[in-house]
Image (cartoon, rainbow, N blue to C red):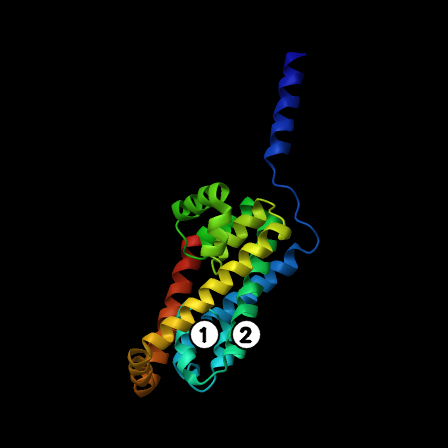
């Protein structure tokens, strides 16, 4: 009888350790995440050709801080800059949150296996988000891993939306102000990138390809 009980216990343990099945819409969010990663890579490869004459396209591809800064002197209207940049930021936030909500710990493993994030960094973020979510979400409002962690933790949108809005408002106001304070230096950088645009694009493409190959081989 004890032998049967032990076998039942092992089967029960195995069942508990097995990750729960993802909801039916889980693959949709994974595909959306992959599409956003592709857009980010396109922006990383071609930002030098887009920053001056196609700032909206650049922000649609990626709204990382460096692209937000570089597009300010392009003549883009403040309204377009805020709306497009914020929309792209929130698109990433929603997708990463839903991937984390659907796949939990598996999603976190994907970040450190395939996206080049050290496992220790993911674990550190996880601990900090658990303790200081009210601070981490606004401060790292553009961080994919933070949003995935909020999804894995099951944080409600009722809590997240106010924190996200505060983070976006502070970030965009600060970047807009700094870009104007250092406008002359920023224009010098932009003029330099325009002068060496072809070489910069080629170099960025090489870096993007090598980084993705390294991350993929590391995650296998």
Q: Nearer the viewer, residue 187 or 198?
A: 187
Q: CA distance from mark 1 to mark 2?
A: 15 Å
Q: Which residue is mark 1?
A: 43
Q: Which residue is drawn at the image coordinates 30% and 87% (left, top)?
A: 195
Question: Which mark is nearer the camera, 1 or 2?
Answer: 2
In the depicted structure, whether residue 102 falls above or below residue 180: above
Identify the residue at image location x=53%, y=54%.
147
Residue 60 coordinates in the image, percent (x, y): 53, 74
> Farthest residue toward the right?
24
Residue 206 visible in the displayed image: yes
Give the quadrant of the N terminus. Answer: top right
Q: Give how far across and how far down residue 181 sits, in percent.
A: 33, 75
Identify the mark at residue 89; answer none if there is no mark.
none
In the image, what residue occupies the spot 58% across and 50% down? 151
The percent position of residue 64, horizontal first and vertical second, equals: 44, 68
**Does residue 189 appear to the left or right of 157 in the view shown?**
left
Crowding at mark 2 (Cα within 10 Å: few <14, some 14-19, many 20+): many
Residue 55 horizontal/vertical position (percent)? 47, 81
Secondary element under disc 2, as helix, strand or loop, is helix
Q: Residue at x 47, y 44 (%)?
A: 132
Q: Which residue is mark 2?
A: 84
- C-beta proximity under 8 Å, tags 1 and 2: no
- Residue 83, quarter of picture: bottom right
**Residue 51 location, quadrant:** bottom left
Residue 220 showing in the rendered view:
no
Residue 164 vertical placement versus 3 (above, below): below
Secondary-structure class at tag 1: helix
Answer with left or right where residue 164 lies relative to residue 71.
right
Q: Nearer the viewer, residue 205 or 162?
A: 162
Say how many tags the image has.
2
Q: Is residue 203 left or right of residue 173?
A: left
């Amino acid at each position: 009888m004890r032998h049967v009980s032990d076998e039942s216990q092992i089967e029960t343990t195995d069942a508990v350790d097995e990750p729960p099945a993802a909801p039916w819409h889980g693959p949709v969010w994974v595909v959306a995440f992959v599409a956003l990663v592709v857009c980010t890579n396109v922006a990383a490869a071609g930002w030098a050709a887009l920053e001056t004459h196609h700032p909206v396209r650049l922000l649609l591809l990626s709204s990382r801080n460096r692209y937000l800064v570089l597009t300010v002197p392009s003549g883009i209207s403040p309204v377009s800059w805020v709306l497009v940049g914020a929309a792209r930021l929130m698109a990433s936030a929603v997708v990463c949150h839903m991937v984390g909500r659907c796949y939990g710990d598996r999603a976190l493993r994907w970040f450190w296996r395939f996206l080049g994030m050290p496992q220790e960094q993911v674990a550190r973020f996880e601990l900090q988000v658990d303790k200081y979510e009210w601070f981490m979400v606004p401060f790292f409002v553009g961080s994919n891993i933070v949003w995935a962690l909020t999804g894995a933790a099951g944080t409600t949108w009722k809590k997240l939306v106010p924190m996200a809005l505060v983070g976006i408002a502070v970030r965009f106001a600060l970047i807009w102000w700094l870009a104007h304070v250092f406008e002359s230096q920023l224009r010098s950088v932009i003029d330099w990138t325009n002068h060496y645009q072809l070489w910069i694009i080629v170099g960025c493409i090489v870096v993007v390809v090598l980084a993705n190959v390294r991350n993929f081989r590391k995650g296998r």
